[in-house]
Amino acid sequence: MKEDRNLNAFLAYYREEKGKLAAAQRLYNRELRKDPNRLLRTFTSDLADLDEGGKLLRGVLVKLGYRAAGGPRPEEADDLALAFEIFQTAVLVHDDIIDNAETRRGKTTIHRRYEQRLDVRGISACAGGEPVSHVARSAALCAGDLGLYAANRKLAESYRNHPKLGELLLYFDEVVINTIRGELLDVVLPYELEDAIYSEEEKAKLLEKSVGDIYRLKTAWYSVVGPLHLGMMLAGAEESDLKAMDRFGSDVGVAFQIMDDILGIYADAETLGKDIGSDISEFKQTILYLYVRTRCPERMEELLRYYGRKPVSEEELEAVRTIFRESGALDYARDTMNACFARAERRLSRMAFLDADDRAVFRGLCAYMRGRRK
């Protein structure tokens, strides 16, 4: 089948580039670990360890963007890909603090690691100090900040003599800013919707718009749009081609987040590599929740019996799964995701700057995203 050929084309490219980047990433993280202060080495080592646990998908997309724009030397994009990966890891450290997550990429989250280390050593507090849990989160927050600026430094150092450095830094920072804007909106939205100043109709409209904004800002920008754009920019792509790829990336990124929301409820923790049900305990305003609140309000009272519970039991998780399935929310999410993928593939057919081989790889990317299970 043609779809299988496209998927195989992407997987072949992904595996080859992932292998190359993984080797380069190990060298980069070896240096990241070498902090002259032994106490700080604990956190730079944790950051490096977490950085090496990912799929390297965003880094590979940087390379794919460079290839799509006709970049002459594929290895030129390697350091840009590594910078993007450490940025993503840093954002995930912050995200795990916000979500009180226990695991990430199949490993213990950084704030929980430090809390466990202090506990093993019998350290519960210092004189007049904060509780261990607060200190652990504060330390992880600093580690995440370190990762953000390490990414910026990697980009600046590696391309200091490149004519596109200024544009690369400006766009990279735009990706960072939009990602943080999306995260901030994700954090405050449930509380803002409690304001009595809004009517129920206004709340529904605000919720729908904000969920869409979160998907585009928090996920699409840093998962797909940003890496592809940066790779193409490094290769000297035309502005019109960049805009066309941005529109494609936005559709794929939104579909990626919808799939993530579905997996966050219906996958299993071992496969996913992170906590299942965290969207429920953190009262996440996902497309599934949006559907029930705006399209099936008769199930809201039942949903709110479980939504926001900490921790979420297996029975409560199964109850939420049933509500989303029976209300039509799961089907709606899948239909919306599939519409995004279909629109993205139509955009691909209009990108004259892609040759047949590149177009097959991009179509395979869509097939990969659609079929992922973690």
Image: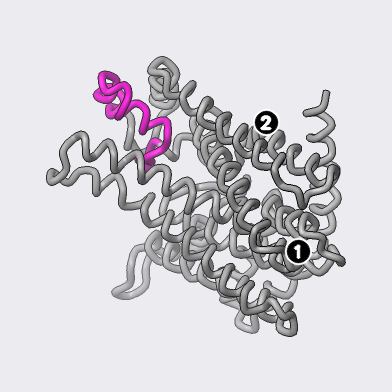
The residue lying at 35 percent from left, 52 percent from top is 187
Residue 298 is inside the magenta segment = yes
Mark 1 neighbour density, 10 Å: few (under 14) some (14–19) many (20 or more): many
Image coords of residue 167 (percent x, y) = 62, 74
Can you identify the residue that label 2 sits on? 371
Q: Is residue 138 left or right of residue 31?
A: left
Q: At label 1, which amino acid type do we have?
A: Gln
Q: Nearer the viewer, residue 193 or 342?
A: 342
Query: What x and y, as percent, mark residue 299?
Result: 29, 20
Q: Which residue is mark 1?
A: 25
Query: Residue 45 bears which disc, if any?
Result: none
**Prevalent SS, magenta region:** helix
Q: Is residue 289 left or right of residue 170?
A: left
Q: Between residue 316 and residue 257, name the one nearer to us.
A: 257
Q: Is residue 292 left or right of residue 200?
A: right
Q: Is residue 227 visible?
A: no
Residue 94's place in the image compared with 107, above or below, is below
SS state under label 1: helix
Label 2 packing within 10 angstroms: few (<14), some (14-19), many (20+)? few
Which quadrant of the rendered structure holds the C terminus? Answer: top right
Sequence order check: which comes first, mark 2 or mark 1? Answer: 1
Give the spatial CA distance, label 2 vs label 1: 27 Å
Direction from residue 358 to residue 204 in the image, left or right: left
Q: What residue is rendered at 56% in x and 30% in y?
A: 339
Q: Give the image location of residue 372, x and y in percent.
A: 66, 34
* Tag 2: amino acid: Gly
**Residue 291 in picture, x, y percent from top left:** 37, 28
**Residue 70 appears in which quarter of the rendering?**
bottom right
Q: Is residue 43 magenta?
A: no
The span shown in magenta is 280-305
Residue drawn at 65 percent across, 36 percent down: 346
Q: Nearer the viewer, mark 2 or mark 1?
A: 2
